[in-house]
Amino acid sequence: MALTGIQIFKLLPKTNCGECGVPTCLAFAMNLAAGKAELDSCPYVSDEAREQLAEASAPPIRPLTVGSGDTAVKIGGETVLFRHEKTFFNPPGIAGRIKDTDEGIADKAKKWAEFQYERVGLNLRPELVFLECASGDAAKFEAAAKAVVDNSDLSLVLACEDPEVMAPVAKAMKDKKPLVYAATNANADKMSAIAGELGLPLAIKAADIDEAIALSDELTEAGHKDLVIDSGARDIAGLFQDQVAIRRSALQQQNRSLGFPTICFADALGTDMGEQVAAAAMLIAKYAGIVVLDDMTAEAVFPLLLERLNIYTDPQRPMTQNEGIYEIGGPSPDSPLLITTNFSLTYFIVSGEIESSRVPSWLLIKDTEGLSVMTAWAAGKFSGDDVGMFVKKIGIEEKINHKSLVIPGYAAAIAGDVEEELPGWNIQVGPREAAHLTKFLKEWSPG
Ligand code: SF4
């Protein structure tokens, strides 16, 4: 049961030393109760209090990691029902299903691992293979797992309900930290022993939520902390209802039995990729930990990756690009120099247009706390003084032969102030729309 801020406060040292980043223990307690602070921020909590507080301040849905390396996926750890209340933290893993009886497993894994897209400075990609043992043969299952890991960096969900088959393959793959899928009513004790011995996360496969609760309690009792729930739903309405019920129960009723991330099967709806993508899109929004597709194609995966990016960005904080000098297309000292704000979308659009103009250019990104050009200008974060001082401090003068700076068309009003701050510079007003940058750059001269 979660503790209130006052209950937490009673367990803190009450010295108001401020080392946790807020001035008082009471403020820290309130933040902790609201899930806005980490207990580790206070170095003076006694061990006894830490034990009580750790339990009380643990996220209602346990965070855990499936996989290793670049494709390790941290799932769970969510604290809200709706992202506008705070944010969603850990994007669901996207998995494609491969059966160990399939032909061309290595090629498939290789192809899926190449579905990588750079957007707003992030690398978007699917992370997992849901490897199903359809053969019932441990050697074949292990060979398929090896084909995946030897030919891709994708992480694994090992899917087999026969403990005799699962045991050697899970052992062989243990360094890849696969998810062991799944413990059922029939095999829970044996699957629990395999996952427990190897320190791997374990999925529960239940017929419904009641059965999931019973299995979760049994496995938690046996010492498993890293559980993933498959509620058994295999139709769109059931998937939606179960996901919402599990999230609500964990968050609003503090039901620890359901306080785990989930695995959901969009491919249970059939082989039509359109329907699978629609189901997966719903599951990404509400509230899957891992979504399994029957196949992965670029046109199926790309929109899901973009949706996942959008749903799992903090709605209270604009996405930003790091302040700095960006070289686009290998600019020389005579190339044009432009400046804009650090709103990710602005950066993404402007840099994309410069790239497609094929005119190598220097792009300065100024920190405006993630505001776009007009908003930043209106808020006084992209004023002439600011821009001028930024150009001086960033060190661009050492990289170019001219003193010409292109400011965004929407910030034309600051041109005079920038000139005052940068005597000897030629301040040019660029186009208002990024789409017109190509023509502008092709005709550009330092003046
Ligand atoms: Fe209180 Fe700990 Fe924060 Fe110091 S660091 S103010 S003792 S909660």
Image: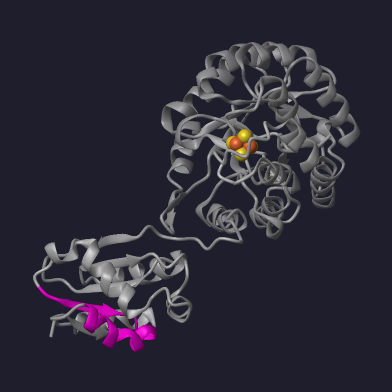
Position of 71 relative to 162 (above/below) = below
Residue 431 makes an appearance in the image: no
- At 49% from the left and 36% from the top, the residue drawn is 71
In the picture, residue 205 is in which quadrant? Answer: top right
Front residue of this view, candidates 172 and 82: 82
Residue 169 position within the rendered picture, expressed as x and y whole percent measured from the top left? 58, 16
- At 47% from the left and 81% from the top, the residue drawn is 378
* Position of the C terminus by quadrant: bottom left
Residue 383 position within the rendered picture, expressed as x and y whole percent measured from the top left? 36, 78
Q: Magenta segment, which residues? A: 402-421
Would you say 176 lies left or right of 235 here? left
In the image, farthest residue toward the right: 210
Would you say 394 lies left or right of 289 here? left
Residue 224 makes an appearance in the image: yes
Front residue of this view, candidates 420 and 91: 420
- At 12% from the left and 67% from the top, the residue drawn is 400
In the picture, residue 82 is in which quadrant? Answer: bottom right
Which quadrant contains ligand 1? Answer: top right
Magenta region, main secondary structure? helix
Position of 293 relative to 101 (above/below) = below
Front residue of this view, candidates 195 and 134: 195
Would you say 425 lies left or right of 232 here? left
- At 43% from the left and 26% from the top, the residue drawn is 150
Residue 47 position within the rendered picture, expressed as x and y whole percent measured from the top left? 67, 20
